[in-house]
Image (spheres, rainbow, N blue to C red):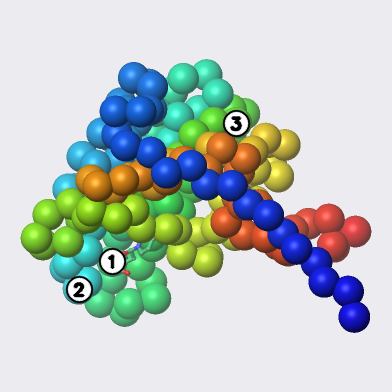
């Protein structure tokens, strides 16, 4: 039997280690988390996307009394960005979360469905998306795109 070893690299950073542009994006995600609609989980998630032309788009989680009808912050934001700017690639996605007690010390990783959508956006524009997961104690920087968080992924290549 052979083994397949998949290596991934995630940088663990303090807020101050990010560039000014990244800090601005992180702050927009943090602000967006405050505008969430999360009456059921009371868990707010904000996302901010910087497009290749510098445009910044933000969004947050939108819940529903019929729980599965709600949508995560990442997908709300990416779908909106792609709907408004279909010809512009996504460069960086920043995510921040908060509970009723305030911002979280540890970063929250995107859920599986959001990872799959991030993958689709990368394929659509043939460009890896930088991903920043913010926490007040430490943040994660994924520079090489969603394959780091979603190894062995299913994409349109398999449909050919
Ligand atoms: N949520 C997100 O918005 N993004 C994630 O990556 C994980 C979870 C939302 C969905 C739901 O509104 C709340 O957080 C609790 O799961």
Query: Label 2's element?
Result: loop
Pick whichever of labels 3 and 1 is earlier in the sequence.
Answer: 1
Q: Crowding at label 1, few (<14), some or many (≥20) Cα neighbours within 10 Å?
A: many
Q: Residue at x 50, y 28 (%)?
A: 51
Looking at the picture, how far across and down is residue 107, in whole percent?
Answer: 34, 53
Looking at the image, residue 2 sits to the left or right of residue 39; the answer is right
Looking at the image, residue 129 sits to the left or right of residue 126; the answer is left
Q: For the N terminus, which image quadrant?
A: bottom right
Q: Residue furthest left?
A: 101
Pick whichever of labels 2 and 3 is earlier in the sequence.
Answer: 2
Q: For the C terminus, which image quadrant?
A: bottom right
**Residue toward you, 45 or 149:** 149
Mark 2 CB near ligand 1 (8 Å cut): yes
Which mark is drawn over residue 89? 3
Looking at the picture, how far across and down is residue 97, in whole percent?
Answer: 27, 53
Q: Residue at x 18, y 52 (%)?
A: 103
Q: CA distance from mark 2 to mark 3?
A: 33 Å
Mark 1 CB near ligand 1 (8 Å cut): yes
**Residue toward you, 145 or 33:** 145
């Amino acid at each position: 039997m052979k083994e397949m070893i998949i290596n991934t690299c995630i940088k663990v950073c303090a807020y101050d280690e990010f560039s000014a542009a990244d800090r601005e994006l992180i702050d927009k995600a943090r602000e967006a988390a405050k505008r969430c609609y999360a009456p059921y989980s009371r868990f707010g998630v904000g996302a901010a996307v910087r497009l290749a032309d510098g445009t910044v788009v933000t969004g947050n989680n939108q819940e529903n009394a019929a729980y599965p009808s709600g949508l995560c912050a990442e997908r709300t934001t990416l779908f909106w960005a792609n709907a408004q700017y279909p010809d512009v690639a996504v460069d960086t996605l920043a995510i921040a979360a908060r509970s009723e007690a305030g911002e979280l010390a540890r970063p929250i990783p995107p859920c599986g469905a959001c990872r799959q959508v991030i993958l689709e956006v990368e394929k659509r524009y043939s460009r890896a998306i930088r991903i920043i997961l913010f926490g007040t104690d430490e943040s994660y920087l994924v520079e090489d795109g969603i394959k780091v968080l979603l190894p062995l992924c299913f994409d349109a290549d398999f449909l050919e």
